[in-house]
Structure formats: structure tokens, C-alpha cells
Amino acid sequence: MSGIPSAWQQAADCLADAGCETVFGLPTDEPGLLDAADAHPKLRAVGVRAHRAGACMAIGHAVVTGRPVVLALGAGPPFGDAVTALIEADSLCAPVVVVTTRIPAEGLGRGGFQDVDQAALAAAFTTTYLRVQDPGTLAWALRRAVHMSVNGRPGVSVVEVGHEVTEAAIPADAPPGYGPVRRLRSVPEEAELRRAAGILAVAERPLLLLGGGARAAAAGTAALALAERWGAPVMTTAAGRSTVPEDHALVCGSVGLYATPPLETVQCGADTVLAVGSRLEETARMGWDTLESVRLVQIDSDPAAFGAGVVEPAAALLGDAAATVALLAGLLPQRTPEREEWLRTAAHARRTAQLSWSADGDRAESPARTALHALAEIFPEATTVHDNGMNDIWSYHWPVHRVGPRARTVVPGEQTMLGFGTAAAPGVALAAGRPTVVVCGDGGAEMGLDALPTAAELGLGLVLVVFDNQGYGWPRLLRHELDAPTGLTRFARPLPVDDVVRGLGGQVESPDGAAAIPAALRRARDAAASGCIALVRIKVPDDDVPPGVRRLFLTGGEDAGDPI
């Protein structure tokens, strides 16, 4: 590692020993952590073009692998540029270890170049913030940060390395080898489990709700075993998708904003809910008018999750999702005859949703729906990375977009930052080892544009499915509902995203009509398999509104016109 300060060499050794494998970041003025990672035999350095995009890539990589990922930042503006994405990382419980620098001590509070109180900026989204001012504490701080990022409620930890430490001579044999940081798992006391099981046992209309915490803990097998024994339909939050395969007969799509009619009747009909790894955030509660009257049992590894979503749990079980669900299932009696009737009701709603919203459904087709139906057939093993827009919300609705047993999804968290999908996709593709498809709007594609050079340089072969409504569809819809001006929501001069993709050696198609979309997606799949970026731009009309949005935000709800 010639020319790399010994502090950064030690940092690379410590992070690799702690179980980190990938470091995202921009090169700094002088060789730093990214350079040390690039020279390290056990680390992979990924150079990015923007700090925000790099943070999104780190999130995508961490969500897919479940392992800690490192984001290397400089002091001041680089740290600030990444904050938006790091807030999203916190909401997703993504284990991201940020290693940043601090300006020389003599400049602190005295007009020093790029002097920013980074700890104050980070206070809202970090699990821990550690300042290293003594070279002797660098190794400890880095390992501590990795531990804090993966244990308890996983999330963002920050290590701020003082300028003086980066210039200090540190012996090469300073850090001892402890091995990868282990994720610690615990389960509730037996008395608490039995109390919760007693509540679940008397439920007449039970519902199992799986959130992002259930997915992160790989609780799917245990959850389905519990659901079958308990006699409960299964629904997920957006972040909880991929926990269980959606072709299972008990799975009834997602809750809240993303409940597909008539499956909202399943969530609203439940009298008892077992929520695993979910805080019951606002989008999960939307349209769930009966939620405050249900008996709620909640499982989470974070005590702050209990009661966070308005409803106070009748039983709160603090522990690992997979292990706790498995123990709880063993305490439940076999399902009762009364629950068989409830399961038939849920199954009827599931069949009706399939008839109404599947590819051969009886509703008029839309370009967005055509694309999403085709994705499940053409990319059965893909990881789909979602964004936050208007038409791409269709992709949150089962069965319009289906997550089969070999597929995965990655979604933005409670912040739903625009541009997340395209920006996170390179990190997802690096980790997934399978096709990676981004579903976004044209606004989101423009906002994540600076991630595409990284994808091209690494030959990652992304597929971008861009629903193009010439601007920002969500604020346009709400403004239209308020009879307010919509001019600012339309792009007078769109960014030349297509030209950028072609300039990076990629392929662009704009299919003419819904019938041409499946063939365009197959060609995109073939191009991406060779390492190229493939963009399929699909024109969508303003009135192609997903059912959850129509039900909850438009005057007249579902009667405000049929889906296009």
C-alpha cells in the first residue's frame, strides 16, 4: 500500500477483519480509505460519481447481503451530500458504516476550510457516532461501529477520524484479529411467549403481518409455518416483500397504501394481528380503519418499535424475528374451524384480486401494468429495485407485480427518497448475483443518473424500466385534485437520459404501445446479460393511477374512474 497513510491501512485491515467486504466512496485529495480498500486483498473498493449515489449503493448492497457495508466520505460537503440517503438507510435499518474525516483541530470553530458539525447533522439517523482523536483508538472505534451497525436495531454508524490521526504513524501490527462481527440474536422469556400465544390462540380472524425486520432476519420459513398452524392469511409491508413467496396460498399482498382491492378487506377484517419486524409506519396504516381496534402482538429486535405505529401492543416480544416466530409457533394450538371460514374469506379476496388485476384480468390494461406483468415472466429470478413515484407504485401492488420464490425486491424506506432505485441499483447488482431491474419514473431516473457510470464501469448490466409521464406525476395528481396549477410538475427540457445510457455503451428502447413492451423487455434482458445498461422507456398517461392511490387520495376513491 505504498503512499497510503498507515492509519488508513490499519482501517482497511480492521474493517476487513470485522467482516466488511465492500467500500463505496469518492477519491479524496490525498490517498485515503478508498485507496486502502482498493489495495486490500479482502476488500472491494467501488468508486462513485456522487456521494448521495454512493450512499444509496451502500444501502442496496447492505439490504441484499444483510452484512455491514462501508461508505467512505470526506469532511464537510461530502458528508452533507450523503445525508439524504443516510436518512433512508436509517429507515431501512441498513447496516452502513460511514467513515469520515475531520478538519485539523486548529481550524475547528475558527473558519477552518469545510468545518461542519457532522455529529449534529448525523444525530437524527445514527446508531452511534464515534470520534477518533487518538491513533490508539482507531481500531477499537471501527470495530465498535461495525458491531453497532448490525446489532440491536441495525442502521448507520459513523466514525469521524481526526486529521491528526490520518497523519500519525501507526504500527502495521497494531490491530489484533478478532474475526467477523457476529449478529447477536436473542428471544423473549418463555412466560412472555406463552402470554402472547394465549392472545393469538383465541383470535377468530388472525392476520400475520411481515415487515422489513422479518425479511432481514430471514424469518420467511418460520412465518409460513406459524401462519399455517395459526390459520392466518399473510400480508407484508413494502419492505417486507420477499420474506415469503407471493405464490403461497396464504399470502394476500401488501397492506395500507399498497393493498390491492379487494385485499384491503383482509387487513380490515382481522381482529388480531401478529406484526413481525414492522413499526406499522404511516403507509402501512393507510386505509386500515379498523387497526386501532385489533389486538396487536408485536415482535421486534428494537424496543422503540413497540407502539411507534399508534397502536399499543397487547404483547411486545423483544427478540430476533425468525427465532421468536419459530418458538411462538410451537406454542400455538392447531387452527380452529372458525378460522377455516376466515381463511376461505381471505382466499376469495385473493382469487378476486388475481382475476381483476392479473395479466388476463377483466380490467382494461395499462402500459405500466403490461410491463410489470411481463417482468415476472421474463425475469423470474431478478432483484427488482423500486423508486418513489406515481406510476411505479403499481409495482408495489400484488398481483400486478409478483415476487416469486426466486425473486427479490429492494424498496426505499419510510422516507421514500426520489431517485433511490437507480442510485441503489449498482450496489444491489454487485451483491445479488442475479439480474437487477429498476422500476422508476422519468423524474426518478433523472435524479439517480449519476449512478449509471459506476454501473457501466463495472459491467453490471442493469435493466431500467422507466415510466415516462414527462415530469413528476405524484405532485401533479395531488395538485389536479386540489384544482391547483400543474405546470411546474412538467419537464420543459428533460435531461437526455437516453443519450447518457447510449454514451455509456447501453441500449435504449421506447416501445410503441403496450403490445410491444414484452419483446422490448426480452431484448433488454439479453443486453443486460452481456453487461450493458438497458433502458426501456414506457410512455404512461396521467390517469394511469394505482388503486391504492386512487382509493386513498382521490375524491370518490375507487369510484373516481376505472384504472386505465
Image (spheres, rainbow, N blue to C red):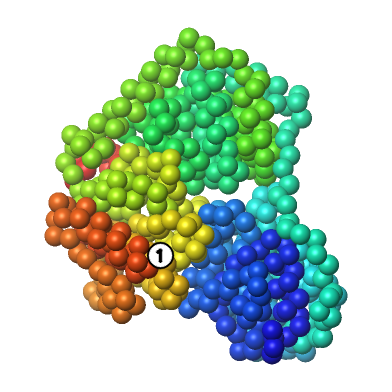
**Dot 1: what SS?**
helix
Q: Position of residue 109 (x, y in %)?
A: 73, 84
Q: Nearer the viewer, residue 383 or 214?
A: 383
Identified at 76% across, 64% down, the residue is 143
Q: Nearer the viewer, residue 204 or 308?
A: 204
Q: Position of residue 222 (x, y in %)?
A: 58, 32
Identified at 57% across, 58% down, the residue is 62
Residue 2 visible in this rendered orientation of the protein: yes
Residue 313 visible in this rendered orientation of the protein: no
Q: Position of residue 274 (x, y in %)?
A: 56, 30
- Going by the image, does 487 lie left or right of 228? left
- Going by the image, does 275 lie left or right of 498? right
Identified at 82% across, 71% down, the residue is 175
Instruction: Name the residue that disc number 1 marks.
Output: 422
Give the amino acid type for the residue marked by disc 1 in the picture: Thr
Q: Position of residue 163 (x, y in %)?
A: 74, 84
Seen in the picture, residue 26 relative to 388 is either above or below; the reply is below
Which of the 4 quarters of the picture holds residue 326? Answer: top right
Identified at 28% across, 28% down, the residue is 352
Image quadrant in which the N terminus is located? bottom right
Seen in the picture, residue 155 relative to 48 is either above or below; the reply is above
Q: Nearer the viewer, residue 206 or 553?
A: 206
Q: For the residue carrying disc 1, how many other residues have a C-alpha within 10 Å: few (<14), some (14-19), or many (20+)?
A: many
Seen in the picture, residue 106 relative to 228 is either above or below; the reply is below
- Going by the image, does 461 lie left or right of 96? left
